[in-house]
Amino acid sequence: MAGSIGSIGGGLGGIDPFAGLGSINTDVGGAKGATGTDESSKVGATGEANSASGFASMLADKISSLSSQQTAASNEMNAVATGQVDDVAQSMVRIEQANVSLQMATQVRNKVIEAYQEIIRMQI
């Protein structure tokens, strides 16, 4: 599976499908929860609360980044359509990067749903 994901970038002329996702930051010290309290103070010996808030904040950051990238691609398409862009090829590359990022996010969502459904089907 990892080989097929890695080959996506090479098949698209060097477009990095992971460009819109950025790097994963696992340091979430001082993260505030819905109650406004410091979630790191509630972490037990295993660090479960910190891990959960870290995943939630990482997911929110990536969704926000994806949304920003889609908005920028939409603006870029409008600029190309109205003739405001000098380098159409570069604009098309940016639009395609946003498209590939959206496709990857959709596939990640599908895999998460599959994993959840598999866990639900497990016999205890």
Image (cartoon, helix red, strand yellow):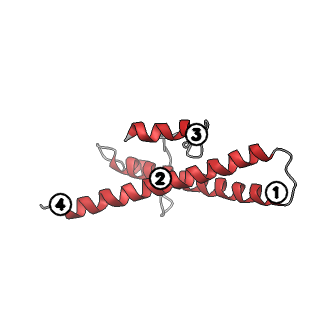
- Please identify the residue farthest to the left as the structure is shown: 124
Nearer to us: label 2 or label 3: 3
Q: Which residue is mark 1?
A: 79
Residue type for callout 3? Asp
* Quadrant that contains the N terminus: top left
Position of 35 with respect to 48 (left or right) is right
In primary-sequence order, the first of circles 2 and 3 is: 3
Of the pair 116 and 35, the residue shown nearer to us: 116
Q: Residue visible at 69% across and 59% down?
A: 71
Do the CB atoms of the residues marked 3 and 1 lie less than 8 Å apart? Answer: no
Expressed as whole percent of the image width and height from the top left, the position of residue 24 reads: 50, 41
Residue 118 place in picture, x, y as percent? 25, 59
Name the secondary structure under disc 4: loop
Q: Residue at x 37, y 51 (%)?
A: 49
Q: CA distance from mark 2 to mark 4?
A: 35 Å
Q: Secondary structure at mark 3?
A: loop
Q: For the C terminus, give its image quadrant.
A: bottom left
Residue at horizontal 64%, vertical 49%?
Answer: 96
Q: Which mark is residue 16?
A: 3
Q: In this figure, which residue is indicated by the disc labeled 4?
A: 122
Please name the amino acid that badge 1 sits on. Answer: Ala
Amino acid marked by disc 2: Asp
Foreground residue among 58 and 27: 58
